[in-house]
Amino acid sequence: MTKIKVSDFLHKPDLEELTNELIAADLGQDLSNEIIEQTRKIKSETPEEALKSVLYSHLSKKPRILNVDSPLTAVMVVGVNGTGKTTTIAKLARMFQNRGSVVLAAADTFRAAAVEQLQTWGKRIDVTVISGKENSDPAAVAFDAIEKSQQLSASFLFIDTAGRLHNKSDLMNELGKIKRVIEKVAPVSEVLMVIDATTGQNGLQQAKIFAEAVQVTGIVLTKLDGSARGGIALAIEDELDIPIKFVGTGESIDDLAVFDPEEYIRGLIS
């Protein structure tokens, strides 16, 4: 996450500098300008407190905990290829293993590597992985997985999905079909979208597209362990009102944390 040097930016010469810093942190031009203008109007003991209060106001007010259903919590995980989606599913499985048995569904059948990767993770953390033949119907895999989850009395089912099809329409139709098939058996508790923090404003565009395809209920922001600035999280919450629920902080299976707004804002400004 970026460290923004905040001086007495209430004076006009400093406003332009801070605006550039916010843009560099991946908040985007329009949102950065809006935040600066709002900050100028706030009376506060310190510039830092004024800016912090404005940044908080742009975060979603929706719950950040995973919506857990009984007896089975079914979670679709979506996102473009290369964001760390499949690894994130394994991390989620690991995080919730202590709350009940977990099943994974390898429904990204268009990429053999994704299926193999999920199967490998399943063996490592000792969870059941349901998969089909290469290029088989993803919705059929999801249906088999939810039926198997019920047979095993599993508490959690995490479903991997394709990140790229031939065109946007195909992607929307495929995700919608998977969700409808699952809901014939049990409700979909969450649709989590995985976004790579290093993609900057592209992350916002990705979120818009997937939100159109299926009702995204939460974001998992990955790759916040390096030089990623993380401002895209605030941009997504401000424009789409989709809460960041988890953050990936490293490559290890345990490097997944619940999103902490206070820590995030503190890391964004210093």
Image (spheres, helix red, strand yellow):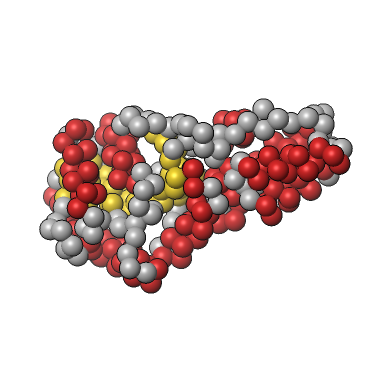
Q: Residue at x 28, y 39 (%)?
A: 90
Quadrant (top left, top right, bottom left, bottom right) of the C terminus? top right
In this image, 83 relative to 178: left or right? right
In this image, 117 relative to 15: left or right? left
Q: Residue at x 25, y 37 (%)?
A: 100
Above or below — where is 22 with respect to 135? above
Image coordinates for residue 76, horizontal then vertical, percent: 33, 53
Residue lying farthest to the right in this orientation: 11
Q: Nearer the viewer, residue 60 or 29?
A: 29
Image coordinates for residue 222, horizontal then vertical, percent: 43, 40
In this image, 152 relative to 87: left or right? left
Location of residue 4 (image quadrant):
top right
Answer whether residue 160 is visible to the viewer in this image.
Answer: yes
Answer whether residue 187 is visible to the viewer in this image.
Answer: no
Above or below — where is 203 with respect to 16? below
Location of residue 254 (image quadrant):
top left
Image coordinates for residue 191, horizontal then vertical, percent: 38, 54
Q: Residue at x 56, y 34 (%)?
A: 1
State how many labels appear.
0
Image coordinates for residue 96, horizontal then vertical, percent: 31, 36
Q: Nearer the viewer, residue 97 or 231?
A: 231
Q: Residue at x 41, y 65 (%)?
A: 213
Q: Nearer the viewer, residue 163 or 63?
A: 163
Above or below — where is 22 with respect to 6? below
Location of residue 233 (image quadrant):
top right
